[in-house]
Image: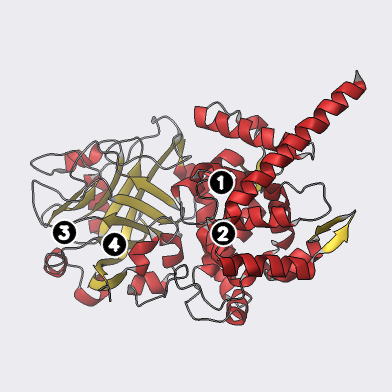
């Protein structure tokens, strides 16, 4: 009986390995000839014979990819590569595993895996299972398929999910933000020099906004696989930067002209507060590579005036990016106008179901950054709005979330000099304060560009944040700076 079971397991493992090889052959076709050459050349040159199999050991992998020690990610990425490559019990990563690892992180899995399937495999490779996994390729493959199908059906049990340590996620997010500063044409040595500079600490503080975007629990030591997957699913371009880094190293190129876009001049607020790397996680890459940012309006340059904003925005017909930097506002504020604003829009009370964000994040001195990606031309009107289903709201700090249009409405933005700027309101011929008392995902800026508020209580014109369905978030704020950037397509030569 035992021999029969063992034989069946061997057949299963052999079948899984055969499938792995067949998949890898398809991945390999997605690499061009030069990339195939460098991949094979580098692997052969550094491979070592371990138990009769040529592999890259952990030391070889970490030395070759050379992620600076300040991130403490080399060992983590090696184990991720082994799990994606199906090499957990080889004492290293073999050539098939290396091809699969590079393909997964650089987008060369197309026509073999779907995007969500690949993302799930990557995130799964980061986890620390609550229960020990058998190391055979078959059991890992079965676990992957089973867990992925359960998530798609919404049947996962949070207590049984594998988890990812928050410390690892912070380091990973910090690395992604640092890579976001790379410029086309820089040599790799300059990249590494930048990565180990003092800017890493600044990026680490911003990485906390990303971690809070996965789930805003400051006491959490780890995040569930599903939470991280859903966060990265909504920030679908986040991992591309990590793939770019692997490409630069593996293929010995100083630049990837079709991958790393040149950092052209962007908005003042975007530059000064390092917002671009976060924006590039969810705004399509072609927006940055095929468009030039045009400075339409900045409150510090043009004044805190709705008339100035209208004048600066009305003549631009393309898509725009609105950025708002602010500080929290509460009832103890000394300014009379601030108190009047708070009285005009009463806060929602705690009878609302769900967790209140204020119970999670209590630092009143924290910086707030809100914004919107707006498709179509701005128009000033008391009765009609603008934008389409490609418009979305976002919050970059103190937590990172995107709120996409739900197609409930065909008017997503309202701009009225007498009322203010509003996103997420019900369609109405007349805009009044009563509309702001409704539930939903709403961003409002008053007609003096002084104060505003953001509310996250239910699905409406915009969807709720991923993993935030049970959280009621309401923030009143005092505006520090407003910026509007136009996106002007570059001429094709």
User: Real-space Cα distance between discs 3 and 4?
Assistant: 11 Å
Under circle 4, the secondary element is strand
Instruction: Read off the residue under disc 3.
Output: 377
User: Real-space Cα distance between discs 3 and 2?
Assistant: 34 Å
- In this view of the protein, can residue 331 be seen by the observer? no
The reply, left or right, for residue 91 in relation to residue 445 is right
Under circle 3, the secondary element is loop
Q: Report the quarter where the N terminus lies.
A: top right
Instruction: Read off the residue under disc 2.
Output: 173
Which of disc 2 and disc 4 is earlier in sequence? Answer: 2
Q: Position of residue 40 (x, y in %)?
A: 69, 65
The reply, left or right, for residue 140 in relation to residue 34 is right
User: Real-space Cα distance between discs 4 and 1?
Assistant: 30 Å
Instruction: Read off the residue under disc 4.
Output: 321
Which residue corresponds to the image point at 50% horizontal and 43% vertical from the top-left?
114
- In this view of the protein, can residue 116 be seen by the observer? yes
Under circle 1, the secondary element is helix
Instruction: Read off the residue under disc 1.
Output: 118
Q: Report the quarter where the C terminus lies.
A: bottom left
């Amino acid at each position: 009986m035992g021999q029969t079971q063992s034989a069946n397991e061997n057949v299963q493992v052999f079948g899984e390995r055969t499938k792995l090889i067949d998949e890898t052959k398809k991945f390999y076709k997605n690499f061009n000839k030069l990339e195939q050459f460098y991949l094979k050349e580098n692997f052969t040159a550094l491979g070592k014979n371990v138990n009769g199999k040529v592999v890259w050991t952990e030391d070889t992998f970490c030395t070759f990819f050379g992620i600076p020690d300040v991130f403490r990610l080399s060992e983590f990425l090696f184990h991720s590569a082994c799990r994606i490559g199906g090499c957990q019990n080889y004492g290293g990563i073999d050539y098939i595993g290396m091809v699969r690892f590079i393909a997964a992180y650089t987008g060369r899995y197309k026509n073999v895996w779907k995007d969500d399937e690949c993302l799930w495999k990557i995130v799964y490779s980061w986890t620390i299972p609550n229960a020990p996994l058998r190391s055979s390729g078959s059991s890992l493959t079965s676990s992957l398929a089973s867990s992925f199908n359960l998530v798609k059906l919404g049947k996962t049990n949070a207590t049984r999910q594998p988890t990812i340590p928050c410390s690892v996620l912070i380091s990973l997010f910090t690395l992604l933000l640092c890579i976001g500063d790379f410029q086309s044409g820089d040599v790799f040595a300059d990249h590494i020099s930048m990565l180990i500079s003092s800017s890493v600490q600044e990026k680490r503080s911003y990485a906390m906004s990303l971690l809070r975007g996965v789930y805003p629990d400051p006491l959490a030591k780890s995040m569930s696989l599903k939470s991280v997957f859903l966060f990265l699913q909504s920030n679908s371009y986040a991992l591309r930067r990590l793939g770019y880094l692997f490409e630069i190293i593996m293929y010995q190129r100083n630049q990837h002209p079709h991958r790393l876009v040149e950092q052209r001049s962007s908005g003042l607020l975007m530059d000064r507060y390092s917002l671009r790397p976060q924006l590039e996680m969810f705004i399509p890459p072609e927006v940055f590579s095929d468009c030039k940012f045009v400075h339409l309006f900045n409150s510090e340059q043009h004044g805190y005036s709705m008339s100035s904003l209208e004048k600066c925005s009305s003549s631009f017909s393309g898509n725009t990016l609105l950025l708002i930097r602010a500080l929290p506002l509460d009832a103890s504020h000394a300014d009379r106008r601030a108190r009047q604003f708070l009285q005009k829009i009463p806060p929602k009370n705690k009878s609302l179901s769900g967790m209140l964000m204020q119970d999670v994040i209590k630092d009143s001195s924290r910086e707030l950054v809100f914004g919107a990606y707006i498709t179509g031309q701005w128009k000033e009107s008391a009765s009609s709005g603008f934008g389409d289903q490609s418009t979305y709201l976002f919050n970059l700090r103190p937590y990172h979330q995107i709120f996409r249009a739900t197609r409930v409405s065909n008017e997503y933005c309202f701009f009225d000099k007498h009322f203010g700027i509003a996103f997420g309101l019900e369609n109405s011929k007349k805009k009044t304060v009563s509309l702001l008392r409704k539930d939903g995902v709403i961003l409002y800026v008053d007609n003096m560009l002084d104060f505003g508020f953001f509310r996250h209580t239910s699905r409406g014109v915009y969807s709720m944040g991923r993993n935030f369905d049970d959280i009621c978030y309401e923030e009143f704020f005092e505006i520090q700076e407003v910026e509007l950037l136009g996106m002007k397509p570059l001429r094709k030569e």
